[in-house]
Image (cartoon, grey):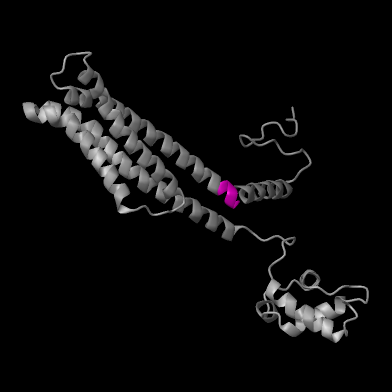
Amino acid sequence: MSTPKGVGRVVAFGRPPAAPDENTAARLAREAAEAAELRAHQARPDVVALRVERVRAQVDRLCWAGIVLGLGFTMTNVQHFAAGDAPVWSLPWLAAWLLDPTVSLVLLAILRAEQVTARYRVRTGPWVRRAKWFTLAATYVMNTWASYAAGSLSGIVLHSVPPLVVFVAAEAVTDLRDKLTEAVSAAFTEADQRRPVTVHERQPRTSARSKRRTTFGEYLAAARAAWAPEVTVTPSWVREVTGCSRGLSSRLAATLVREVGGSGS
């Protein structure tokens, strides 16, 4: 018994089977055209830059989550350090809860500002870095002071890890944002250079005349050609028909009025 045509043929996963009357060359040509079109869209600068932007957003969210969780862990230690021997629910004990948010909010504000400056490659002053290091150092000292005073090695390690992670993450996230910004620019430039130029795109034409400044005589000739007896020669009219600057339009108008003998006034 003969096998029906097309049965037993291996079809690539995700691809529709070829038409019964389609030969191998035509199928390969169609698949090559589809692949070329897909690569052309994937290599577009906007698409490449969007992919890097998505990675940047994921990195930002993960770093921010780690920093906020680390600062939240240090809150109780800082409160215990600030409250000291104050009775529970007393005014000093309650006020001690404000110390860690005060330091943390300043640190978060600096990191948020660096997020924007790193995106646009704006260099900040030295006081920004000093403020960040000071807030991180203050958080570390207040977290580990009691452990150092008690000589507890395990307590020092336990209370040192969250502030140090926050410190390292705060430094790393700034550098990561800067490098991801460079990656966006590099990907955009590379994709733009690799993008083929279609026949419908007009290439800019550069010539010696386009680089040369228009002279006074050329402006005057253009105004003379546009003038008619019923036209009132004014600087604004000269600017409209020649595209010259405001300072030059008065001279052109005066010269044209003298040439036409005042008939345009």
Residue 258, above or below 28: below
Q: Quadrant of residue 112?
A: top left
Residue 239, above or below 25: below
- Pick the quarter of the image with the N terminus: top right
The foreground one among 236 and 187 is 236
Q: Quadrant of residue 67?
A: top left
Q: Position of residue 144 (x, y in %)?
A: 16, 31
- Pick the quarter of the image with the C terminus: bottom right
Q: Image check: 231 left or right of 120?
A: right
Q: Image check: 177 left or right of 227?
A: left
Q: Residue at x 74, y 46 (%)?
A: 23
Which stretch did the figure color magenta? Answer: 43-48
Q: Position of residue 186 (x, y in %)?
A: 49, 56
Q: Residue at x 33, y 37 (%)?
A: 106
Q: Quadrant of residue 15?
A: top right
Residue 204, above or below 147: below
Residue 159 appears in the rendering = yes
Based on the picture, tell me whether residue 82 belongs to the magenta stretch. Answer: no
Q: How many marks?
A: 0
Residue 155, above or below 184: above
Q: Position of residue 226 (x, y in %)?
A: 86, 75
Residue 43 appears in the rendering = no
The foreground one among 227 and 63 is 227
The foreground one among 199 and 9 is 199
Q: Main secondary structure of the magenta part?
A: helix
* Residue found at the very far right of the displayed protein: 230
Q: Position of residue 237 (x, y in %)?
A: 81, 70
Q: Residue at x 34, y 53 (%)?
A: 125
